[in-house]
Image (cartoon, helix red, strand yellow):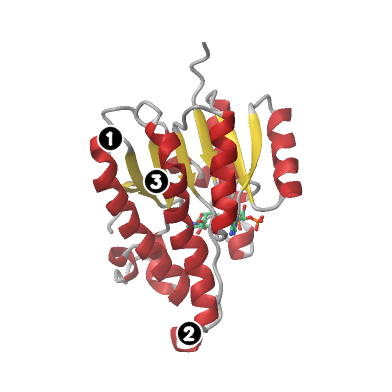
């Protein structure tokens, strides 16, 4: 019987998520490429397969409860356990608006993907995670979600005051801690990561790191063993302030 581990990465058709899928695939994982668009997912999987990776597409819009339910019921017919879940899908809206001018519609749209999405996905895929030996969940947070960094005038993260995005990632950190506490007794580890400033479509490709470089912390936390941490927040320099 194969002991190949299985990983699901949301929003993996491009950017950091694609690089996480590639990195885990290169380590021998079977990677399920979460994509809200079937064609974009198919193209990403074809590229991963060309690199010799065991990759499959999973149609998954984290903002749509019906899509998440359908994806989890489809995946539970394909595999008997899920070893790794990376909640990577995320959006940023309102780069040019001060907090006092950001619309409630934008705020809700960002929270739907960045906060409610990961909650929904963990809840839907928990039965499969429970069936794995020592499953790992990685939450793609941001330095902009760190209250410690955004209040530190020496930090680059103190300069971007994005109401919806920053606060959604702060909420995601709290969500990560809540699940880490609940799931510790089941041997499921939940950690948040901060990828650094990565050039992707999310930020108009303005960033110091490549997506492959931005994927490093997520891959590290996705592959920790029984002695690895849970309920932590990690980046390239190690532990990040909450
Ligand atoms: P990206 O290139 O824009 O990729 C975002 C991914 O999320 C895409 O695959 C996108 O799919 C997907 N997505 C968006 N809404 C979705 C939904 N409702 N359901 C499912 N998938 C959805 O951005 P990225 O920079 O790689 O972002 C990945 C994660 O890293 C995000 O959580 C982001 O907040 C975080 N992050 C990024 C940086 C950075 O510097 N780039 C820094 C800190 C944290 P489509 O192609 O269909 O739009």
Ligand 1, seen in the image, is in the quarter at bottom right
The answer to which quarter of the image holds residue 230 is top left
Q: Earlier in the sequence, mark 2 or mark 1?
A: 2
Secondary structure, mark 1, is helix
Examine the rendering and report whether any part of residue 212 can be seen: no
Q: Earlier in the sequence, mark 2 or mark 3?
A: 2
Mark-to-mark CA distance, 2 and 1: 43 Å
Side of 208 relative to 129 (left or right):
right
Quick one: 34 or 14, which is closer to the camera? 34
Secondary structure, mark 3, is loop
Mark-to-mark CA distance, 2 and 3: 29 Å
Q: Earlier in the sequence, mark 1 or mark 3?
A: 1
**How many dots with numbers?**
3
Which numbered dot is residue 236?
A: 3
The residue wearing badge 1 is: 186
The structure residue drawn at horizontal position 54% and vertical position 42%, both measured from the top left corner, is 72
Q: Nearer the viewer, mark 2 or mark 3?
A: 2
The structure residue drawn at horizontal position 51% and vertical position 69%, both measured from the top left corner, is 110
Which residue, as the protein is rendered here, is positioned at the far bottom?
100
Which residue, as the protein is rendered here, is positioned at the far top?
1
Secondary structure, mark 2, is loop
């Amino acid at each position: 019987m194969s002991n190949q581990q299985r990983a699901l990465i949301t929003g993996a058709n491009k950017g950091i998520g694609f690089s996480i899928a590639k990195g885990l695939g290169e380590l021998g994982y079977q990677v399920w490429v979460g994509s809200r668009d079937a064609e974009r997912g198919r193209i990403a999987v074809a590229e991963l397969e060309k690199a010799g990776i065991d990759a499959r597409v999973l149609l998954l819009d984290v903002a749509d409860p019906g899509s998440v339910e359908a994806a989890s019921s489809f995946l539970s017919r394909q595999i008997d356990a899920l070893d790794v879940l990376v909640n990577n899908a995320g959006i940023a809206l309102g780069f040019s608006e001060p907090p006092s001018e950001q619309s409630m519609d934008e705020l809700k749209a960002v929270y739907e993907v960045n906060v409610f999405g990961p909650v929904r996905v963990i809840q839907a895929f928990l039965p499969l995670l429970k069936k794995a030996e020592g499953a790992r969940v990685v939450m793609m947070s941001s330095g902009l979600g760190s209250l410690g960094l955004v209040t530190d005038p020496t930090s680059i993260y103190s300069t971007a005051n994005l109401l919806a995005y920053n606060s959604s990632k702060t909420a995601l950190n709290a969500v990560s801690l809540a699940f880490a506490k609940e799931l510790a007794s089941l041997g499921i580890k939940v950690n948040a990561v901060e990828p650094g400033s990565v050039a992707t479509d999310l930020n108009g490709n303005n960033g110091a790191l490549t997506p492959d470089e931005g994927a490093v912390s997520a891959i590290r936390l996705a592959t920790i063993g029984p002695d690895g941490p849970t309920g932590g927040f990690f980046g390239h320099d190690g532990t990040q302030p909450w």
